[in-house]
Amino acid sequence: MNAKANFGTSSRLSGKVAVVSGAGTYGGEGIGNGAATAILLAREGARVVLVDLVEEWADATKSLIQNEGGLAMSIAADVTKAEQCKEVVDFAVREFNTIDILHNNVGGGSGSGNVVEATQDIWANSMSVNLMSIINMSRYSIPYMRGNSGGSIINVSSVTGMRPKSGRSSAPYTMNKTAVVGLTRAMALDHAGESIRVNCIMPGLIWTPRVSSGSPDSRPTRQSSTPLPNEGESWDIGWAAVYLASDQAKFVTGIVIPVDGGFLLTSTPN
Ligand SMILES: NC(=O)c1ccc[n+]([C@@H]2O[C@H](COP(=O)([O-])OP(=O)(O)OC[C@H]3O[C@@H](n4cnc5c(N)ncnc54)[C@H](O)[C@@H]3O)[C@@H](O)[C@H]2O)c1
């Protein structure tokens, strides 16, 4: 693990309970966006529920947190399935009494092709992974946040939602990541009166194990497409989430934070 992640620890989230979807790391090695976020939330004092399709990957994040003295529980679930989301929320409340923070990290899926090529199944899968995962988890978590007089929901989009990939069509993924922004704004307004804040993080080109295993040769292009010289890493996404989850963002709702090294300011390939 990158030692840089250790800087700036404090207790901004002590007493809070966070649920993170996709909190494992693809392939179990390295660190994915959800895992890094879960670790930083725990370092800031939150008790964290780690949700992943693959139990061992969630357990690996749990071990990292517990080895640092943090509190975490893991559960295997598919957050595209409403009934499994309900089970996750019930589990979180049973273990930690409530939910204050919901980090909807799961996204991606098979969203490639243009409208001529992409099949009905690809459209349905992309919507399920990128949107229904957020909707299902939020639906069951919000009643507990109401009971706490508030909460923070963070939805993960992508720069692709603002700038479709050049040369490799991914219309379903692009549409759904754009829709994450619309959904965030609608949720923010719908639940503002209940002090539930809803915000969105828009990652740029982050070198996660999922990306490196899917397109190992893309690293130089990804690096040169980003204005800042340092490469985006999962910790960068995690720090944005820590801010949005914390009371330091208590007057912040309905916003989109690109964490992209300036990528959206350019027209370089992605
Ligand atoms: N890596 C990037 O460059 C990048 C760029 C833009 C946006 N994002 C977004 O960041 C998020 C995380 O991406 P990542 O690259 O860290 O890795 P990732 O998408 O592999 O996610 C990590 C974990 O999510 C789990 N997961 C997948 N589907 C699930 C489901 N239905 N239910 C429960 N768990 C599930 C996986 O098992 C894996 O452990 C996604 O929303 C992705 O679209 C990533």
Image: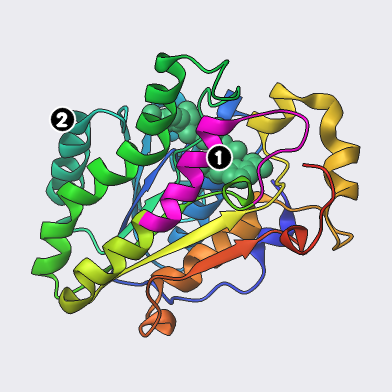
Nearer-the-camera pick, 154 or 119: 119
- The residue indicated by pointer 2 is 83
95 vs 250, left or right, is: left
Q: Secondary structure at mark 1?
A: helix
Q: Is mark 2 within 8 Å of ligand 1?
A: no
Three-letter code for the amino acid on which mark 1 is drawn = Thr
- The residue indicated by pointer 1 is 174
Q: Residue at x 43, y 34 (%)?
A: 58
Report if residue 145 lies within the magenta region: no
Q: Quadrant of residue 137?
A: top left
Nearer-the-camera pick, 38 or 210: 210
Q: Position of residue 90 (x, y in %)?
A: 13, 43
Q: Between marks 1 and 2, how big is the CA–CA gap?
A: 27 Å
Q: Secondary structure at mark 2?
A: helix
Q: Residue at x 70, y 58 (%)?
A: 260
Dominant SS in magenta: helix
Q: Position of residue 248 (x, y in %)?
A: 43, 83
Q: Residue at x 43, y 77 (%)?
A: 12
Is any part of residue 57 visible from this angle?
no
Q: Position of residue 148 (x, y in %)?
A: 14, 71
158 vs 51, left or right, is: right
Three-letter code for the amino acid on which mark 2 is drawn = Glu
Report if residue 181 lies within the magenta region: yes
Quadrant in the picture for the N terminus: top right
Query: From which residue to which does the magenta span run?
Result: 163-182
User: Which mark is in front, 1 or 2?
Assistant: 1
Is residue 88 positioned above or below 94 on the image? above
- Is tag 1's residue or tag 2's residue first in the polypeptide sequence? 2
Is any part of residue 30 visible from this angle?
yes
Q: Residues within 10 Å of mark 1 (few under 14, many from 20)?
A: many
